Structures are given as C-alpha cells and as structure tokens.
Image (spheres, rainbow, N blue to C red):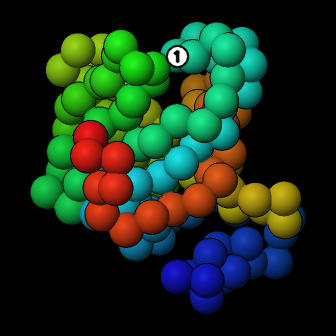
Amino acid sequence: MATMLASAAGATSAATLNEAQLDGLLAGNTVYLSIPVGNPARPEGGIVPFKYGADGTASVRLSDDLTLVGTWSINSDHYCVDWSNGPKNSCTKVVKSQDGIDLVDPKSGDSRGTIERIVPGNPEQL
C-alpha cells in the first residue's frame, strides 16, 4: 500500500487517487479521519472512524449517539456514500500530498478531514 500511495503523489505535490487506489485504500478497512472543528458533520471536530466494507456497506460513528449506515461505491476518481439515515450521494475525493491524505469535497474543494490511520477490518464494530 505504501508504494501505491507514493505513486499516487507522482510528480506533483498533490494527486487525487484513482479507482484502483481508492479500492485498495478503503475496501475492507476502517479509516480514522481527523475532522476539523466547524465541520457540519461533527462541529467539535475530532477523530471519527469510517468503515468501508468490502461488500459495499459503510458506517461512521459521529458521536456516541449517532452512527450513520449506508452503502458506498467508487466512481472514477472519487467515491460516494448513500447514508440510510443521513445524506444521499455524499461524494468525496481522496488527495495524497506530502502532508498526508485528505478527504475533499469534490464540488467545493473543502477538506472533510485528514486520514490519521487505516486499520484492516472493523475494529470499532460499526
């Protein structure tokens, strides 16, 4: 995976991951995302676990009281989630730079957060 991420950076300082890279990074893993303060999904910010099931299921624990569940799919250079109990067609680009890996809103270009770590499976039981 390190080679895959290194190659994603290419000759530029930042690069959007492609379909194969997204699949390798997300499918079957729990991604711990550092969300900035002021983010609408979690205004207080913090570390949030997102589970991207290899079967296309998705879950995110936004707080002790709120876990979103849905399905995710890859669409070229981004992925989208249809949350059963939240937003539909929520799409995200994953951008690798020298500073880390960011999740970015493809329409506004705003950062949704930075990946802190990736753990295989579903250690959070989401």
Q: Answer with left or right where residue 121 lies relative to residue 10.
A: left
- Taking depth in this image into account, of 44 and 18 the one nearest to the observer is 44
Residue type pointed to by label 1: Ala
Which residue is painted at 65% across and 53% down in the image? 116
Which residue is painted at 64% across and 11% down in the image? 43
Residue 16 in the image: x percent, y percent? 62, 58
Query: Of helix, strand and loop, which one carries label 1?
Result: loop
Q: Residues within 10 Å of mark 1 (few under 14, many from 20)?
A: few
- Taking depth in this image into account, of 84 and 46 the one nearest to the observer is 46
Q: Is residue 23 above or below residue 126?
A: below
Which residue is painted at 73% across and 27% down in the image? 36
Residue 82 in the image: x percent, y percent? 25, 28
Residue 112: image quadrant is top right
Quadrant containing the C terminus is top left
Residue 80 in the image: x percent, y percent? 35, 38
Residue 68: image quadrant is top left
Q: Is residue 75 visible?
A: no
Label total for image: 1
Q: Mark 1 = which residue?
A: 41
Q: Is residue 84 above or below residue 23?
A: above
Residue 86 in the image: x percent, y percent? 30, 14
Q: Answer with left or right where residue 89 lies relative to residue 78.
A: left
**Outermost residue, left side:** 55
**Outermost residue, bottom side:** 3
Q: Is residue 83 visible?
A: yes
Which residue is painted at 45% across and 64% down in the image? 119
Q: Answer with left or right where residue 60 lies relative to residue 118.
A: left
